[in-house]
Amino acid sequence: MTINTLAKGGWHRDQMACFRKMEKVIVAMQDPDMGMKMRNQRLLITVIPHAMTGRDVINWLMQKYNMCEEEALHLGGMLVRYGYIYPLKEPRSLVLRADESPYRFQTPYFWTSTRWPATELDYAIYLAKKNIRKQGELMEYEKERYSVLHKRINHTWDFVVMQAREQLRASKQRRKADRIVLECQEQAYWLINRPPVSLTLSTFRIYFIAHFVCVCVCVCTFCLCLQIEFCRRALGRNRVKSSICLEGFVKYSEQYLSHDPIMQGCLPSNPWISDDTAHWTMNTEVVPIPSRLRVERWSFSFMELLNDAMGRREFMTYLEKEFSAENLCFWQACEDIRHGENSRIVEKVEEVYKNFLAPGAARWVNIDSKTMDKTLKGIQHPHRFVMDDAQMHIYFLMKKDSFPRYLKSDLYKNMLAKAIVPQEVKKSVFPFMRRQRHSSPSPAQAVAQASEEEGRA
Amino acid sequence: MRSPPIPEMATQEVQLSETLAHLKTESDTLKGKLEEERAKLHDVELHQVAEKVEGLGQFVMKTRRTLKGHGNKVLCMDWCKDKRRIVSSSQDGKVIVWDAFTTNKEHAVTMPCTWVMACAYAPSGCAVACGGLDNKCSVYPLSLDKNENLAAKKKSVAMHTNYLSACSFTNSDMQILTSSGDGTCALWDVESGQLLQSFHGHAADVLCLDLAPSETGNTFVSGGCDKKANVWDMRSGQCIQSFETHESDINNSSEADREVAIYSKESIIFGVSSVDFSLSGRLLFGGYNDYTINVWDVLKGTRVSILFGHENRVSTLRVSPDGTAFCTGSWDHTLRTWA
């Protein structure tokens, strides 16, 4: 379904956006007041006007964009790579050097974004010129392309040679400095924009567009109907003020700040930095004593508590004391239905009904009558989401009632008090003594072992 | 090309264009109303709310591990829940499972197609899913038997009519969410390969998706070449919300009714291919097409740090499940873990 929209010059719109940004930088660099200071550069014995050194470029970028040298080198390198600045010495090496190497701005005529994709004819003329001027000094790949082009556009070869001769004659009449500059510009342009070998896509495009227009009208009505439907639904939705939503986000990031290892580091140390896996060992799914941060996190939201296996276990213990453990069991069983295999849905729904919903069930859950009726009716034709309403009801019951009480309970408070706060272990004093990086058992292994044991039993 | 119109056809055409005009007016009126409603609630900007938040200091992050082994561009990667293993896929058709901590390769699968654009680790850690130009998403259970050929146990789960751009397991190993170049997303049952739900609404290729679990059921967001990011309800298949933004395609999505902030700098020229948030949501990491990674302060909107290291475009970036590090995959054939 990919519909390519090629902008002017055959470039994709995201490429054009990049070119425009680079051109903005280049224009700023050439600003008469705030731009770079140009001077004459010596290239062997010839003096080239309006040139600058690599060091100048980097200093200007560092100053204008307030960046470090590494980034300036990187950005400047991009400008050279895409042909906006070209080197005078070693023109084939499209690299920005942070020294006295001379560079020049490429004339806008040759900017990648303004040129139509370089045609074979232009390239043929360029190669012919080069061949005539410096007999036999074409590079390997240039020689190849020259012979390929010679075969392909043989019918216009006279024109190519004639054009090449004319252009060479005209350039001989220029001053040496100008000539060198123009040659450099042209060479830089062709280094970057060598035309690839490609089929003519124009014919395909015409057929596609014609067909597309015909289909368009029919699709239009359909699309508009969909849009209207969507707008109506969107208008009916509940909305929240920006301030509330954004403040919520700020609060969230502040709350989780100490849990963010990249922001605040982690104890005893970040395994990736220190090569010590203690942090992971202390925070595996089931540990004898959990860390303090982990236990604190259970209090952030009910979902956090339920998402942590240990948290869920602790909460279950608490509910058992309150004789309402069946709520959590029911919720877990519903989750299993929602995320489990398609083939086992029917049997799982049966189980849940038997254990939690049937009158006189062993672990009957307390749901309001309306939800109960709806669920029981749904069970006649069980599907993945049949328990959703009941599950939601029990979830919010636990969240509003049992969860806050759990956080205030002695069980939780003792857990928090017992919890470990690991000592920080700084990275080894001798940086070249790298610690042994131990491998860990693959999760796949644990499951394989478990199923082996099951098989044996 | 067209034959002269018959009188009946002429009236039909007139009717059709009248209906079109009528529908267009209705659509525009509703859109206008929607904009009004949204504007009423937009009472503050992010940077205003974030004024009282402390700024961030200097960040020092380095490459901690370099994973070499792919023979071509790395296109996608995903973390395992054990926080140290990853799966990565590349243009040469290889899918490799690494222990990124020791840099050991644990499993390797050769796909029958090149350009494996999507890969995902199952929540249990026992399987991986991948796909690309073969228009399918296949699940490979990870066997520890060195002699066993992983490809033998492969399970074809999803079938699209165009390339697979992204895939992700939902809360369990049993369901996979996929997005494709055919403009749709789909939810599949892994065991049977059955299509559980399909999501239509994008006008062009869908390039990425991300899950957003919530208390009231699951939603996910998808981004596509039509410059839209859509939020979907997984259960009903409906598009709940749509965001239109950006000058170019949306390559990555990770999760307000309107664009909250734009992160850009004059000196950043090239587009970003992949993004992810740090654990607290305070930092946003972006992998760019100019081989760098920019780290943004989400609340203040400033660029905190720029990281160099890759020698070609950064194609994929993900933060580890516990937030201790993030991993990037690049067209320079390597993956790097940063912390």
Image: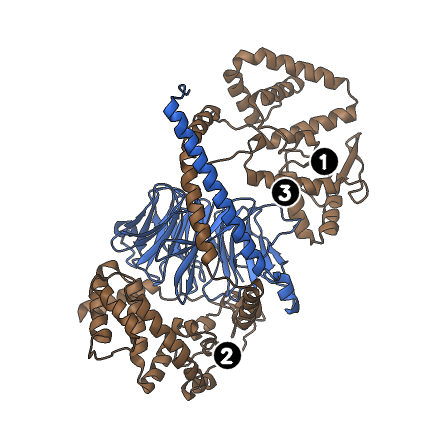
- Labels 2, 1: one chain: yes
Q: Which mark is residue A78?
A: 3
Q: Chain of mark 1?
A: A
Mark 2 element type? loop
Question: Where residue B56 sits: x, y (%)?
Answer: 64, 66
> Is residue A346 shown to the viewer in this render?
yes
Residue found 44% across the figure and 82% down from its top:
A407
Residue A105's label in the rendered image is 1
Please say whether residue B259 is visible from this viewpoint: no
Spot occupied by residue A93 in the image (x, y as percentages of width and height): 64, 37
Of all chains, the one bearing label 3 is A
Front-most of residues A352 and B104: A352
Q: Earlier in the sequence, mark 2 or mark 1?
A: 1
Q: Secondary structure at mark 1?
A: strand
Horizontal side of A181 relative to B197 (left or right) equals right
Is disc 1 surrounded by few (<14), some (14 to 19) or many (20+) residues within 10 Å? many
Give the chain ID for the blue colour.
Answer: B
The crowding category of the residue bearing disc 3, from other C-alpha atoms within 10 Å (few below 14, some 14 to 19, many at least 20), is many
| Disc 3 element | helix
Residue under pointer 2: A422
- Mark 1 vs 3, N-terminal side: 3
Q: Position of residue A193 (x, y in %)?
A: 59, 31
Is B143 displayed left or right of B68 in the figure? left
